[in-house]
Every structure is written in structure tokens, then in C-alpha cells.
């Protein structure tokens, strides 16, 4: 999730590495989370050790890149559920 140089080395995708244990090279501006750099780079350290959150972001990226509509409330609810599970907080279904 670093900014790849135009002609230089492209780092591995951090959210793929965290979620799946392996990763492709950063796709740069082809990624749904790219806007003059990786928008997830600010939370990269927070994602380390949180594969469920990284997987949610990968799934969201896949949906966006496939051109599917994302229900914002559903995405927020899913993220809140994952974060609450990490904290041991019970949430109603």
C-alpha cells in the first residue's frame, strides 16, 4: 500500500498480504483504493494483525472494481461487526 514509482519497484499489496498471506504487486491507479496514492496507507499499521478487516477491504475493492454498487450502510455494518468481535462486544443481529 505504498505509492509505486512510475518506473521503479512496485511493493506488494499490504491488504492482500495481511488478509491472505500472499500478495500481488500494487496495481497503483488501477486499484479502487488509489487516489494519487493508496488511500489505505494511513491505516496500514492498524490493519496489521487484523486479517478480517483486511479481507473485508479486499472484498469491497473487488466489488468496486467489478463495477457493482456497494450499499454503504451494509459495508459500515459489516465493518462494525468485525471490529466489535475483535473487542469482544456482542452485537444484536
Image: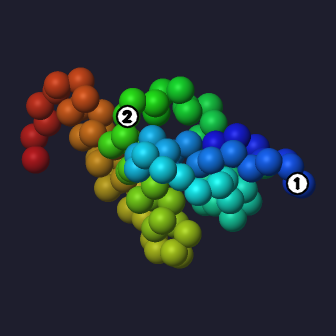
Q: Please give the label number shown on residue 6.
A: 1
- Where residue 65 appears, x then y in whole percent? 55, 69
- Where residue 68 appears, x then y in whole percent? 47, 74
What is the crowding at mark 2: few (fewer than 14 residues within 10 Å), some, or many (at least 20)?
Answer: some
Residue that sits furthest to the right in the current view: 7
Instruction: Left or right? Give the position of 79 relative to 65.
Output: left
Q: Nearer the viewer, residue 5 or 75?
A: 5
Q: Earlier in the sequence, mark 2 or mark 1?
A: 1
Q: Nearer the viewer, residue 7 or 37?
A: 7
User: Residue at the spot x=37%, y=40% of the render?
Assistant: 51
Instruction: Left or right? Give the position of 18 relative to 87.
Output: right
Residue that sits furthest to the bottom in the current view: 67
SS of the residue at dot 1? loop
* 70 up-or-down from 47: above or below: below
Instruction: Left or right? Give the position of 43 relative to 91.
Output: right
- Where residue 80 appears, x then y in whole percent? 30, 39
Q: Is residue 69 visible?
A: yes
User: Residue at the spot x=37%, y=34% of the render?
Assistant: 50
Q: Please give the label number shown on residue 37.
A: none
User: Residue at the spot x=53%, y=75% of the render?
Assistant: 67
Q: Nearer the viewer, residue 29 or 10?
A: 10
C-alpha span from label 2 to label 1: 30 Å
Q: Quadrant of residue 31?
A: bottom right
User: Residue at the spot x=63%, y=36% of the render?
Assistant: 41
SS of the residue at dot 2? loop
What is the crowding at mark 1: few (fewer than 14 residues within 10 Å), some, or many (at least 20)?
Answer: few
Q: Is residue 37 visible?
A: no
Q: How is the image coloured?
A: rainbow
Q: Check the picture and name the quadrant holding the N terminus.
A: top right
**Residue at the spot of label 2:** 50
Amino acid at each position: 500500500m505504498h505509492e509505486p514509482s512510475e518506473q521503479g519497484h512496485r511493493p506488494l499489496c499490504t491488504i492482500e498480504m495481511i488478509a491472505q498471506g500472499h500478495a500481488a504487486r500494487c496495481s497503483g491507479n488501477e486499484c479502487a483504493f488509489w487516489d494519487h496514492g493508496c488511500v489505505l496507507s494511513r491505516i496500514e499499521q492498524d490493519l496489521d494483525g487484523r486479517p478480517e478487516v483486511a479481507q473485508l477491504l479486499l472484498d469491497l475493492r473487488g466489488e468496486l472494481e467489478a463495477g457493482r454498487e456497494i450499499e454503504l450502510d451494509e459495508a459500515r455494518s459489516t465493518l462494525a461487526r468485525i471490529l466489535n468481535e475483535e473487542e469482544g462486544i456482542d452485537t444484536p443481529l
